[in-house]
Image (cartoon, rainbow, N blue to C red):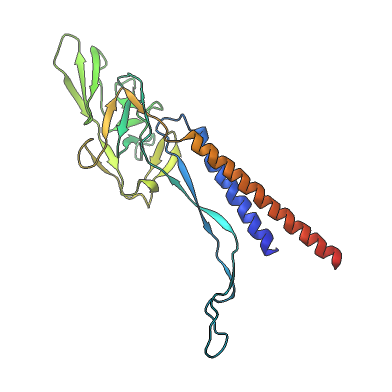
Amino acid sequence: MDLALAIARSGLDAHHKNIEVISNNLANANTTAYKKSRPEFEDLPYSVIKQPGSATSQDTNTTSGLVLGTGTKLANNKKIFTDGSLMQTDNQLDIAIKGNGFLKVQLPNGSDYAYTRAGALQMNEQGQLVMPNGYIIQPPISIPTTGVQKIEISNDGMVNVYVAGSTTPQQVGQLELTDFINPDGLEPIGENLYKISGSSGPGTSGTPGLEGYGTIKQGALEGSNVNVVEEMVNLIEAQRAFEVTSKAVSAVDNMMQNLTRET
């Protein structure tokens, strides 16, 4: 294949993937605690025609060289873990994490765990705190199934309940947060969940508000950190880059047709 055509094709593929990343960001602009992705590109290996600094005589070297690029590719799709804006809900089981950390949940197979910042907690039929999909928050916290008039969750994750006939709060559990050496390395799996990967490092759990962990805000949810205006600008730029690169494909095709006619 003609090198120029291969280069242009790599550009089309990279720009198309860029648009896919941006589209996913826009689609999740209202997803609770969604973290936007940032596409990162890198150039492909170069074809060296003349090595820079190669000898031109016994005493002289070239000041540059002849090195042709072979295109580009989408090398990374980095999650940006900045905090999203807080959305006040006044629901006593809604929590938002301000700062570092994730809630740990148990997956249905009972042996694997995932991590989330989406704090729209609910209670299952046993009174356990769970995600909307039923995944149990770890460590498990159970709310009494009768007589509870109020649930309080403090900034440090302490869960207290007030039962009928008593003015003294009853402690029923402690929320913990898990943080990672490299949260960018977590693997997103859908349902607002992430799994540990080889590049994220093992998670370490601790008390909210201590030793660098974030704090808990009751009655609120963390919104997406997607800036819609910024993503729309990125989308326009990606679309223009795709269109310009497609013109390069057309130019190479016309050149090849001219060469064919001449021969």
Check the image and report above or below for 225 versus 17.
Answer: above
Quadrant in which residue 204 is drawn: top left
Name the residue: 27% across, 30% down: 216
Q: Quadrant of the C terminus?
A: bottom right
Q: Position of residue 237 (x, y in %)?
A: 57, 44
Which quarter of the image is occupied by the N terminus? Answer: bottom right
Horizontal and vertical percent for residue 32? 41, 30
Between 59 and 69, the residue placed more toward the observer is 59
Left or right: 210 as drawn, with respect to 224: left
Using residue 130 as the reference point, say whether residue 161 is left or right of it: left
Q: Position of residue 224 (x, y in %)?
A: 42, 33
Give x and y (percent) for residue 100.
Answer: 30, 40
Q: Residue at x 33, y 34 (%)?
A: 105
Left or right, 257 with respect to 56, comes to right
Identified at 50% across, 35% down, the residue is 229
Residue, far bottom: 58
Most foreground residue, 136 or 38: 38
Query: Residue 121 lies in what quarter of the image?
Result: top left
Inspect this view and state whether residue 23 appears.
Answer: no
* Nearer to me, 246 or 195: 246
